[in-house]
Image: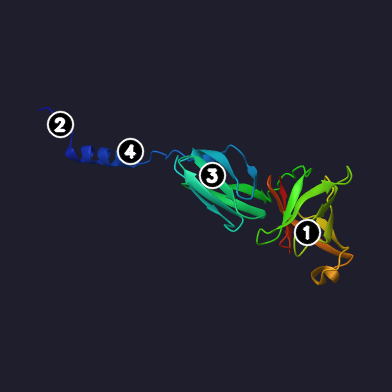
Amino acid sequence: MKRGIHPIYIILSSLLLIPFAGCEEEKPTDPITLSAKSVVVKVGETATVTLGGGTGTYEAASSKTAVATVTLQGKVLTITGVSKGTANIAITSGDKTAQLAVTVEEKKEEIPSLSATGVYDGTSQRLAPKLIARSDKGQWLCQKMGTPYEQRLFIAHLPASAKVGDEVQLKVIDYGVLSEVEDNKEVRATFIIEKVSPLQLKLKSSNARVYIQ
């Protein structure tokens, strides 16, 4: 009589194979890569960084949204400068993390060439039809034609290297008899340059603006 394989051996063999079938190792997640480890951006401007590695999907958050914000589209981070300072962008993908260092700088505007200008007050009333350059070192003289400032002279000293944050002295000279300007005889006023654009120079703490003609 031919003997067959006892059923109990079949069961035992199957049980021994089960642990091996469920022990496949999971593929480890690749580290997150960045096209740049740090960026420098000016206030109001943006910078982009491309991501790689990880699981292919990412999340990003700024440590200081008052300094810099971040948006994520696919694998591209867009960092926007909000105010001067530093911040870190934290990137996560699966169990992997990465950091992007962000430095935000103030945006400095170029100083225009002030060869011929006009001066206005805060209500856009023209105080001087023109400023006449007196030297090549940035000194101008202007005179108003019309009441109540027709007898008032303004001397503005502005070096060619002037930039936002510098102090500017405006000397007011009264050589007439108008009561409106008698108190301002030989007065020196110091203002701080707040903003410079191709069209105007704005003086902080003053309504005066110098416009390029």
Relative horizontal placement of residue 49, taking residue 153 as reference (left or right): left
Pointer 4: residues within 10 angstroms few (<14), some, or many (20+)?
few
Q: Are marks 2 and 4 in contact (CB under 8 Å)?
A: no
Residue under label 2, please give it: 4
Instruction: Determine the CA span between mark 2 and mark 4.
Output: 27 Å
Q: Circle 4 sits in a helix, a strand or a loop, which is it?
A: helix
Residue under label 3, please give it: 78
Q: Closer to the camera: disc 1 or disc 2?
A: 1
Vertical comparison of 14 with 193: above or below:
above
N-terminal of the pair, mark 1 or mark 2, is 2
Q: Are marks 1 and 2 in contact (CB under 8 Å)?
A: no
Q: Closer to the camera: disc 4 or disc 1?
A: 1
N-terminal of the pair, mark 1 or mark 3, is 3
Residue under label 1, please give it: 192
Quadrant of the drawing holding the N terminus: top left
Instruction: Determine the CA span between mark 3 and mark 4.
Output: 45 Å
Instruction: Determine the CA span between mark 4 and mark 1.
Output: 77 Å
Residue 198 horizontal/vertical position (percent): 69, 44
Q: Which of the two residues, 82 or 209, is positioned nearer the viewer here?
A: 209
Relative horizontal placement of residue 144, taking residue 61 as reference (left or right): right
Q: Which amino acid, mark 2?
A: Gly
Q: Which amino acid, mark 1?
A: Ile
Residue under label 4, please give it: 21
Instruction: Determine the CA span between mark 2 and mark 3.
Output: 72 Å
Q: Which mark is residue 134?
A: none
N-terminal of the pair, mark 2 or mark 4, is 2
N-terminal of the pair, mark 3 or mark 4, is 4
Q: Closer to the camera: disc 1 or disc 3?
A: 1
Q: Closer to the camera: disc 3 or disc 4?
A: 3
